[in-house]
């Protein structure tokens, strides 16, 4: 399992004093207020200030002191250690742990690897691209078991739930 989580991506500079504009990769953007440091390019750096602008986060990060400095960090990811995350509730998983899991049905037919987890208003959806594209609604009566350590997810056979919807 990944030991560092990507929580944001630097997408631009902000102002002339080295602040960076961050696209958050976490559902809880308030998390940035609680962070004392992040890893950027594998180097741990202190966060000096946090502001919010629409759906973006503006950070002042130690060691990035000018617009030119900030420019060199565009497209870089901000990461935090897994241990810095609060424990998950039962039956909840980090998306990063789900991606790459192999999905099987109860008849042990391999359906493919999770490429992405899509978030929708009602429920998440597992997206399998190959060997055949498949979108699996993450509902208790469809997704029967998840074993992150084995990278294995078992679902109800597709015909049994696709016909119902």
Image (cartoon, helix red, strand yellow):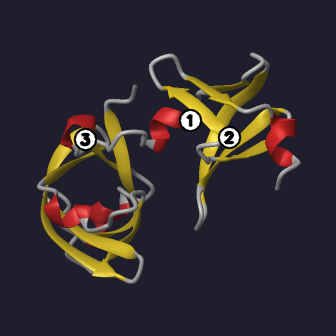
Q: Residue 4 is drawn in which quadrant?
A: top left
Q: Please, what secondary structure does the residue beneath circle 2 have? A: loop
| Contact between labelled residues 2 and 3, with CB atoms less than 8 Å apart | no
Circle nearer the N terminus (1, 3): 3
| Contact between labelled residues 3 and 1, with CB atoms less than 8 Å apart | no
Q: Is residue 25 visible?
A: yes
Q: Nearer the viewer, residue 29 or 123?
A: 123
Q: Residues within 10 Å of mark 1 (few under 14, many from 20)?
A: some
| Contact between labelled residues 1 and 2, with CB atoms less than 8 Å apart | no
Circle nearer the N terminus (3, 2): 3
Numbered mark located on residue 87 in the image:
3
Residue matched to label 2:
142
**What is the number of callouts on the image?**
3
Numbered mark located on residue 99 in the image:
1
- Image side of residue 74 versus residue 32, left or right: right
Circle nearer the N terminus (2, 1): 1
**Nearest-to-viewer mark from 1 and 3:** 3
* Residue 48 image point, x, y percent: 11, 65
- The answer to whether 80 is drawn above or below residue 69 in the figure is above
- Image side of residue 121 versus residue 162, left or right: left
Q: Please, what secondary structure does the residue beneath circle 3 have? A: loop
The residue under the point 61% across, 48% down is 139
Q: Nearer the viewer, residue 20 or 157?
A: 157
Q: Residue 113 is drawn in which quadrant?
A: top right
Q: Residues within 10 Å of mark 3 (few under 14, many from 20)?
A: few
| Quadrant where the N terminus is found in the figure | top left
Q: Residue 92 is drawn in which quadrant?
A: top left
Q: CA distance from mark 1 to mark 3?
A: 19 Å
**Nearest-to-viewer mark from 3 and 2:** 2
Q: Is residue 133 visible?
A: no
């Amino acid at each position: 399992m990944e030991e560092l989580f990507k929580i944001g991506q630097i997408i631009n500079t902000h102002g002339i004093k080295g602040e960076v504009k961050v696209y958050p990769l976490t559902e809880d953007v308030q998390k940035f207020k609680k962070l004392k440091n992040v890893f950027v390019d594998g180097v741990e750096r202190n966060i000096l200030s946090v502001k919010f602008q629409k759906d973006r986060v503006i950070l002042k990060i130690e060691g990035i002191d000018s617009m030119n400095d900030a420019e060199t960090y565009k497209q870089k990811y901000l990461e935090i250690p897994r241990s810095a995350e609060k424990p998950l509730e039962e039956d909840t998983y980090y998306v990063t742990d789900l991606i790459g899991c192999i999905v099987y049905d109860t008849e042990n037919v391999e359906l493919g690897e999770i490429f992405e987890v899509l978030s929708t208003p009602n429920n998440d959806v597992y997206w399998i691209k190959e060997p055949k594209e498949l979108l699996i609604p993450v509902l208790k009566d469809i997704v029967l078991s998840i074993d992150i350590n084995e990278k294995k997810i078992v679902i109800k056979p597709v015909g049994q739930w696709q016909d119902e919807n």
